[in-house]
Image (cartoon, rainbow, N blue to C red):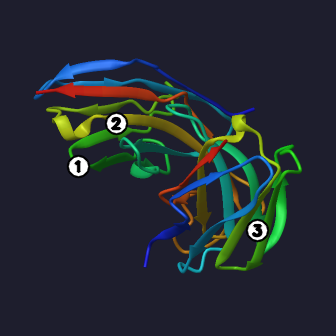
Amino acid sequence: GDSVTQMEGPVTLSEEAFLTINCTYTATGYPSLFWYVQYPGEGLQLLLKATKADDKGSNKGFEATYRKETTSFHLEKGSVQVSDSAVYFCALSRSRSNDYKLSFGAGTTVTVRA
Amino acid sequence: DTEVTQTPKHLVMGMTNKKSLKCEQHMGHRAMYWYKQKAKKPPELMFVYSYEKLSINESVPSRFSPECPNSSLLNLHLHALQPEDSALYLCASSQGRGGAWDTGELFFGEGSRLTVL
């Protein structure tokens, strides 16, 4: 079955540091890949997505590239801010007849210090 | 309108109470989902409705009862819950397959934070 593995952290960084969160997946075919972010006390928000191999998703300075050959979708940001402190989830979407099944990674807690 | 709206945002209930969580979307999506999430853990799928019919029940205890009155609304009825049921309950929606923007994306609401005393 489908599965997603991501580094669990926690990760603690200083402002303006470089952030990488590794994510690898196991799946057949060509699932869509997502990064969701959850800020303290809030729901899940889509951060970025990629729907086919070599697609690069980007948003708010974050980027991730869908690498089929390495089955990876690593999240990167060049210069983090305190406001980026959150839990980040990598996810894979498998289509069914009329809906989708998301497989989530364990989540990575990121804390950015001023 | 690209929102999924959940009410209430916070709910405290006793183990003998009956309450309901509500979810609404006006994006024309034909699939709606309930997830349960514990702190800093990934969401766990509970139920999926596709075209107003229950398509997935992930072996959820019967004290949780979903209902989909129409394509825009999804309810979760709660009865005789246990303290371990305290969690954030997330609703999500997605397009039916084959839509113009069929990317497999789920749109999540802000969640209802449930505390069972």
Tell me the amino acid under the disc marked 3: Ser
Position of residue A38 measured from the top left corner of the image (x, y, whole percent): 41, 43
Residue behind mark 2: A86
Q: Is residue A47 above or below residue A21?
A: below
Please tell me which residue lies in front, B81 or A31. Answer: B81
Element carrying mark 1: loop
Element carrying mark 3: strand
Residue, x 58% and y 57% (percent of image)? Answer: B104
Element carrying mark 2: strand
Parent chain of label 2: A
Parent chain of label 1: A
Residue behind mark 3: B50
Tell me the amino acid under the disc marked 2: Ala
Position of residue A98 measured from the top left corner of the image (x, y, whole percent): 74, 65
- Res A60 label: 1
Residue, x 75% and y 32% (percent of image)? Answer: A1
Q: Nearer the viewer, mark 1 or mark 2?
A: 2
Q: Is residue A35 visible?
A: yes
Q: Quadrant of the N terminus of chain B?
A: bottom left
Q: Nearer the viewer, mark 3 or mark 2?
A: 2
